[in-house]
Image (spheres, rainbow, N blue to C red):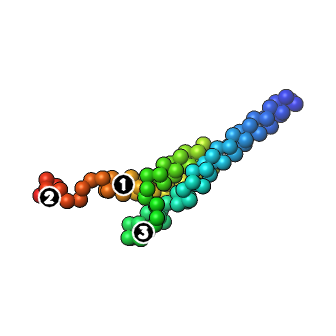
Amino acid sequence: LVDSQSSRWTAFAIQTSISAVFAFFAFLPVAVRPVSAGSGIAEAKAVLNGIEIPDSTSVSTAICKGISVILAAAASLPIGLEGPMIHIGLCVGSNVNKIIPSSDAHLDT
């Protein structure tokens, strides 16, 4: 009985330590790109309403948000995946819109 109780506490300590390490590494991309913190829905609404937020739709912001969401989920933190995916989709859409020409002869029909 003592061995099983001790092994439970050891397993709990190991799992808590691993979660804390994942949570710390989830913070690092947000420290690099502070605009990638939070849900991202507010930033998406602001950008869609025409408000310019510096670096809100850059590729590096999307990468930092994606990495931090994956690590936060691995750390068993209670996160919602809808908000970050909306913000990442906004970043992808904004950057694809910059690549595709807006006035092309064969696009005008």
Q: Is residue 68 above or below residue 44?
A: above
Which mark is first along the chain, 2 or 1? Answer: 1
Residue at the outermost right position:
2
Closer to the camera, 38 or 11? 38
Which mark is first along the chain, 3 or 1? Answer: 3
Closer to the camera, 9 or 50? 50
Near mark 2 (Cα within 10 A), the count class, few <14, some 14-19 or many ≥20, is few
Closer to the camera, 100 or 109? 100
Q: In which quadrant of the rendered view does residue 2 lie? A: top right
Mark 2 and mark 3: span between their CA atoms? 28 Å
Which mark is first along the chain, 3 or 2? Answer: 3
Q: How far from the left and from the top, in percent, is residue 98?
A: 32, 56
For the question of whether residue 78 can be seen, the reply is no
Secondary element under disc 1, as helix, strand or loop, is helix
Residue bearing the label numbered 3: 52
Which labelled disc corresponds to residue 37?
A: none
Which labelled disc corresponds to residue 95?
A: 1
Q: How far from the left and from the top, in percent, is residue 106?
A: 13, 53
Secondary element under disc 2, as helix, strand or loop, is loop
Q: In which quadrant of the rendered view does residue 107 lie? A: bottom left
Residue type at the position of mark 3: Glu
Mark 1 and mark 2: span between their CA atoms? 21 Å
Residue type at the position of mark 2: Asp
Residue type at the position of mark 1: Asn
Residue bearing the label numbered 2: 108
